[in-house]
Image (cartoon, rainbow, N blue to C red):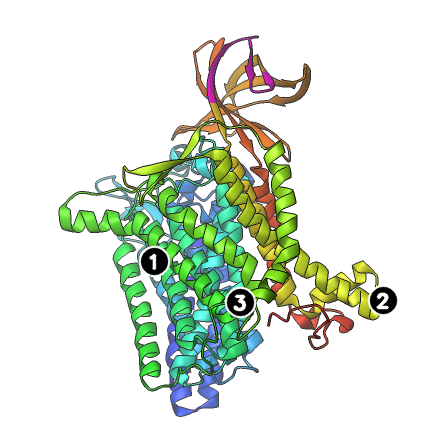
């Protein structure tokens, strides 16, 4: 019965999506209010229908209905209840259903919050959102249906999957199905990986809303900033979910994949990173259109490019076109998804070209100078797009091109990415420090230099302190030229000094500008510093929330530089009771235990004592969990603000008396995770609805003496 309920709800949601598309477009063309409302109601109805379908699958997972092939594939009787619930998105079919539900959730929110204010844009926007939803429901319903069941041919005895009840088939034995059930992939039994996919899906799906409003603006001819106002908050919400998904994915890789790092330039990692890059450029760029009426064509290109990157990333992950620990198995959704990606991108490009040729996307102002905020934002966009192109080429362009035209697959690895991306990231941090200080239209070098004086002094002082306390490192850093064999070497300390300098400058600009705004309120209104700060953030959320986001990215950058340039690696083989010295730490091998766990794992765990200055500071327990499908290396770590002492159980004999450990000391790595928290907090401030704020924080923006209006 559960399968029938889920299948029926999914089918009705598909029908409602198709109906909504047709009626919404008809209503707009005929200017029929009744048809528009009918299309809206059909779109809203897909949310409860998809919720029913998702809950049906969830009930099947929790109640162990192994006759459903999806339940059989992602759980077994030993799977804990928590992992049965999260198995909802643990494989292709369930995750596509969850994707459909999140699409309906964003669509529902966009309709409810924008129906009155943007009524003229809504029919086309609904049609675009429903077209996307209908496509994903369609491939879930037809190609990757999570409600397909196991059947046994009554004549041959062969087992097979079918969505409907086939003729000459019998229900398989429930006990045998339970005994043979596969269980959830061991790689997904980690908190980071449990939360990582939903965050990415929410980030991916959320960018559908600004794309839909942009297409609605192009189709309707309303090319004012209304589509930006309608979609700005949705863009920020999507961006923060995508950011959180990337950070959690890094944490999962750090804890589970057993290589001591958090970002390996894996193609699927990069597929999620590409829409983040284009989306970040878009979020910055639309501010210029709102403030100065400029970059209208470019903003359309960016919002279409962001959604295009989302669909391409989804195609790359789910089609099996690339091999990755992150990707799903090869499936039949590849060609339909590639076709949908091409169609949606082409529609956006054609509409943009049409409006541009008619002169309806003409900019209202010209660029005034190189140091104007508009020009600096354009440079920021150019760098973001250069990063996007470079990463796309290394991840997909070169491998696919070489296979198509030369019959061999060329894989560009870490050396390529570390050769082309660091200079571009450095340029981004430089602009992050300069652009907030520049004025609209034009800025003199003298004024910019004066604004940079205090942040520069703070940067130099902090840099000197960092260089004193930073770990010594004698090995030079190699920089390859665009992934080639040729390159050059620089001392790690010199690379770190330059990197820290530009990153710190961006951070101190954000801090100092916030301080100036607060100090101005304190002087002008005699408020307390706490009240002045809260009021400042409440009255200009975008500016000061943006500064917090910049500060989060600065903290992440410091963590990345420290953990990349100064990571220490070694491998030690210890006998039971033996002690080894690793830099200024002492590590003693105390115990080795083996045994079966209740969930079907066989655990191999070592216990080590970590000491410093002859005092035990931590007990570390790296382990290897052996599942029927595979083994997993789970690190043991002692974390502080300064570094992680990170240990992997690398190899061991049958007795456990002699064990090899891979040991890493990762300086400042926790700043990567802490910076992510600051980034999320800043984005929430920037996106928070003013209607929810207390009355005294909702007034019009005021220019305070000594501050620079960013909007």
Q: Decide: few, some or many residues near mark 3? Use Cα within 10 Å; few <14, some 14-19, many ≥20.
A: many
Is 573 magenta? The answer is yes
Residues packed near mark 1 inside 10 Å, few (<14), some (14 to 19) or many (20 plus): many
Residue 637 spot, x, y in % from top left: 57, 28
Q: Secondary structure at mark 3?
A: helix
Q: Quadrant of residue 178?
A: top left
Q: Which residue is mark 1?
A: 312
- Magenta part of the chain: 570-586
Please identify, in this view, whether the residue under mark 3 or under mark 2 is nearer the observer: 2
Q: Which mark is residue 48?
A: none
* Dot 2 crowding, Cα within 10 Å, few <14, some 14–19, many 20+: few
Instruction: Measure the C-alpha gap from mark 3 to mark 1.
Output: 20 Å
Q: Residue furthest front?
A: 446
Which residue is identified by label 3?
234
Q: Is residue 232 left or right of residue 450?
A: left
- Relative to 127, say whether 50 is above or below: above
The disc, 1 or 2, on the residue closer to the chain's N-terminal end is 1
List the residue tagged with mark 2.
Answer: 526
Q: Quadrant of residue 186?
A: top left
Tell me where residue 172 appears, x and y as whole percent. Answer: 35, 41
Could you tell me if the residues under marks 3 and 1 are in contact, i.e. CB atoms within 8 Å? no
Given contact means CB atoms under 8 Å apart, are the residues at marks 3 and 2 in contact?
no
Q: Secondary structure at mark 2?
A: loop
* Majority secondary structure of magenta residues: strand
Identify whether 8 is placed above or below 479.
below
Residue ID at (35%, 82%) = 355
Separation of residues labelled 3 and 2 (CA atoms): 37 Å
Pick the quarter of the image with the N terminus: bottom left
Residue 316, image x and y in percent? 32, 52
593 or 529: which is nearer to us? 529
Q: Is residue 268 left or right of residue 450?
A: left
């Amino acid at each position: 019965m559960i399968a029938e309920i889920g299948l029926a709800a999914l089918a009705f949601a598909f029908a409602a999506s198709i109906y909504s598309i047709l009626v919404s477009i008809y209503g707009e063309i005929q200017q029929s209010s009744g048809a528009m409302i009918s299309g809206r109601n059909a779109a809203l109805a897909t949310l409860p229908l998809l919720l029913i379908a998702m809950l049906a699958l969830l009930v099947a997972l929790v109640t162990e209905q192994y006759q459903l092939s999806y339940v059989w594939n992602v759980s077994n009787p030993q799977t804990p209840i928590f992992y049965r619930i999260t198995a909802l998105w643990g494989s292709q079919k369930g995750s596509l259903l969850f994707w459909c539900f999140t699409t309906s959730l964003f669509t529902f929110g966009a309709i409810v919050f924008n129906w009155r204010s943007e009524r003229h844009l809504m029919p086309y926007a609904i049609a675009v959102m429903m077209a996307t939803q209908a496509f994903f429901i369609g491939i879930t319903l037809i190609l990757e249906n999570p409600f397909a069941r196991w059947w046994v041919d009554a004549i041959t005895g062969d087992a097979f999957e079918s969505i409907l009840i086939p003729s000459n088939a019998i229900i398989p034995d429930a006990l045998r199905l339970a005994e043979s059930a596969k269980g959830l992939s061991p790689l997904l039994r980690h908190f980071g990986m449990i939360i990582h996919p939903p965050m990415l899906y929410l980030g991916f799906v959320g960018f559908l809303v600004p794309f839909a409003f942009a297409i609605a603006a192009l189709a309707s001819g309303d090319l004012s900033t209304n589509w930006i106002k309608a979609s700005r908050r949705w863009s920020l919400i999507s961006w923060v979910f995508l950011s959180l998904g990337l950070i959690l994915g890094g944490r999962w890789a750090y804890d589970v994949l057993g290589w001591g790092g958090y970002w390996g330039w894996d193609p699927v990692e990069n597929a999620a990173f590409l829409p983040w890059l284009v989306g970040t450029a878009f979020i910055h760029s639309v501010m210029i259109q709102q403030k100065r009426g400029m970059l209208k064509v470019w903003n359309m290109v960016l919002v279409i490019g962001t959604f295009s990157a989302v669909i391409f990333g989804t195609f790359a992950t789910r089609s099996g076109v690339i091999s990755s620990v992150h990707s799903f198995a090869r499936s039949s959704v590849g060609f339909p998804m590639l076709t949908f990606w091409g169609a949606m991108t082409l529609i956006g490009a054609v509409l943009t070209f049409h409006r541009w040729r008619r002169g309806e996307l003409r900019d209202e102002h010209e660029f005034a100078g190189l140091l104007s905020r508009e020009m600096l934002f354009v440079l920021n966009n150019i760098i973001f797009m250069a990063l996007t192109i470079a990463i796309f080429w290394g991840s997909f362009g070169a491998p696919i091109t070489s296979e198509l035209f030369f019959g061999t697959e060329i894989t560009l690895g870490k050396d390529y990415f570390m050769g082309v991306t660091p200079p571009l990231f450095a340029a981004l941090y430089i602009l992050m420090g300069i652009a907030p200080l520049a004025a609209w239209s034009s800025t003199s070098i003298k004024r910019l230099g004066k604004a940079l004086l205090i942040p520069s002094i703070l940067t130099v002082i902090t840099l000197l302190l960092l260089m004193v306390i930073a770990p010594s490192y004698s090995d030079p850093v190699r920089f390859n030229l665009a992934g080639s064999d040729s390159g050059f070497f620089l001392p790690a300390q010199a690379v770190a000094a330059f990197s820290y300098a530009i990153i710190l400058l961006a951070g101190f600009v954000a801090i100092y500008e916030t301080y100036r705004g607060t100090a101005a309120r304190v002087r002008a209104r005699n408020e307390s510093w706490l009240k002045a700060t809260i009021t400042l953030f409440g009255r200009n959320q975008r500016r000061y929330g943006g500064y917090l986001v910049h500060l989060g990215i600065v903290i992440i950058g410091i963590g990345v530089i420290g953990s990349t340039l100064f990571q220490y690696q070694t491998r030690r083989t210890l006998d039971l009771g033996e002690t080894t010295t690793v830099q200024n730490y002492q590590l003693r091998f105390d115990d080795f235990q083996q045994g079966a766990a209740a969930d079907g794992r066989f655990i191999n765990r070592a216990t080590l004592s970590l000491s410093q200055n002859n005092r035990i500071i931590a007990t570390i327990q790296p382990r290897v969990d052996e599942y029927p499908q595979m083994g997993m290396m789970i690190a043991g770590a002692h974390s502080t603000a300064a570094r992680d002492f990170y240990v992997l159980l690398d190899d061991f004999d049958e007795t456990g008396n002699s064990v090899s450990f891979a040991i890493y000391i990762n300086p400042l790595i926790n700043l990567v995770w802490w910076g992510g928290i600051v980034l999320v907090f800043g984005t929430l401030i920037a996106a928070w609805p003013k209607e929810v704020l207390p009355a005294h924080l909702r007034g019009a923006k005021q220019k305070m003496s000594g501050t620079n209006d960013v909007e």
